[in-house]
Amino acid sequence: MEEPGYAPPMDWSGKRVHFIGIGGYGMSGLARVLLARGARVSGSDVRPSDRTRWLAGNGAEVHIGHDARHVAGADLVVYNTDVPADNPELVAARQAGIPVWHRSQVLADLLNHRQAVAVTGTHGKTTTTAMTGLVLVAGGLDPTVLVGGEVPEFGAATARLGHGPWVVAEACESDGTFLRYFPRIAVVTNVEPEHLDHYEGDFRRLLDAFRGFLGNVRPGGLVVACGDHPVVRQLLAGLPAGRVRVARYGVEAEDCHLRARDVQTGPEGTRFSVWQEGRPLGEVTLAVPGEHNVLNALAALAVGLEVGVPFGVAAQALAGFHGAKRRFQVIHDRDGILVVDDYAHHPTEIRATLRAARQRRGAAGRVIAVFQPQRYSRTRLLMDEFARAFGDADKVILTEIYAPPGERPIPGVSSAVLAERIAQEEGRPVDLFASREDLIEHLLATVRPGDLVLTMGAGDIWTVARDLARRLQAVTPA
């Protein structure tokens, strides 16, 4: 019942499409687009959220909890990689002979028959996709944009519905499904060993998947890639000559087609000048901190310039971007105390986010890092890198490992072991809290004006930032 990735375009009008996990970032965005295209959308999730409430208020039938009866009458059932094979709705759909698609197949239908920009890479996909979408919006191209996070400029949604020919979307490498996409423009932010559980623990298999993705770019299309990243350069070197065009961007590499110079960072953001093949284009000022966001902005600029957006228009759009949800999201800023939440869950992301925190807080204030490791498998694989990732933090606090449903603990892999490794690397103690409430009480008792508390992780650590902010506001009401 699985459809091929590059199938003929689907007429969604009138079709009953059921999403298992409709409240997820990626799934809710697709559900929004299909509603706009006339589909009768239903879906289920384990808990309500702002995303499920919006969908329910705009024509979708949303169920809380999974039940086989929910798929009755569906023309198509959509799931994602996180849905277990024994999910009752997935089982019922297959038993009833209802077509079942992975979410990437729905996205492929939306991308492969339009002018598509597909953004991939180990880090920075969500921010780069959002920035690129905003640049195209500012340029009057009215794109559809699908993002893996909520974007304030899109009405705190994960999707923007446009009527122009362009679609901008994240292309997820984690499960190999980006091989279903055939974009006009591909953006590669970086490539590191991550999600290797899908690739049998072999980084070479992950690289092969990226090669396959780049091979899907339409002939004459454009590959926008980070020229500062050695693995990305290795991938570019293997592209067949003349099939596609390449635009490298970067800060360090002098041979980049688009390069940032004179990067100046400060508490209020980042400013840099942009040069295209030795010719100055102008300055860009970003409200989002961190030098990693300079690279993300360069990628968005490269796409914008390719599709005809004037540099000044693109720069103004980037200046107005204040970050996607859980991407250095300021939760609390009062009485000299900052609480920031970020999705960082890989050592490279942690280092970049801590540098941004240090930039925001300055040399005088403390940066308190609260990290929730995600997955036993990732923690085991990257233990040494995690141990070296917290150099810019003045204080490090860990929670227990957040494991997705179905992942079992691995002997010898725990937050206690990681805390010991970080303490050895940093030469100072690392606190570990199993209780969320004890962690919040500890933070309330120890934070002081000048501190920046940074929660990081891909699990539910964001609730600590939220509740800490509420408690701080209750102590010092506005």
Image: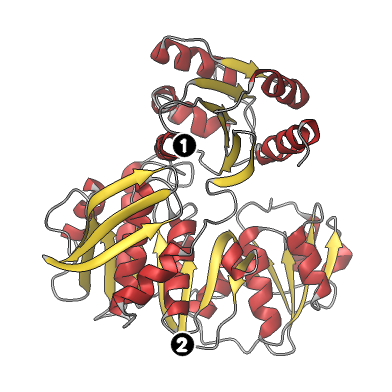
The foreground one among 296 and 262 is: 262
Q: Which callout, 2 or 1, points to the residue nearer the camera?
A: 1
Please provide percent x and percent y for residue 18.
Answer: 75, 71
Q: Is residue 309 left or right of residue 74?
A: left
**Residue found 42% across the figure and 65% down from its top:** 318
Residue linked to disc 1:
357
* Amino acid on which the number 1 mark rests in the picture: Ala
Residues 229 and 207: in front is 229
Hey, which quadrant is residue 442 in on the image? top right
Query: Which residue, given by chain and number where applicable, does mark 2 sit on?
Result: 165
Q: Is residue 211 above or below residue 436?
A: below
- Mark number displayed over residue 478: none
What x and y, as percent, mark residue 169? 48, 69
Q: Is residue 250 above or below residue 333?
A: below
Inter-mark Cα distance, 2 to 1:
38 Å
Alpha-carbon neighbours of circle 2 within 10 Å: few (<14), some, or many (≥20)? few
Q: Residues within 10 Å of mark 1 (few under 14, many from 20)?
A: many
Instruction: Confirm whether residue 347 shows in the render.
Output: yes
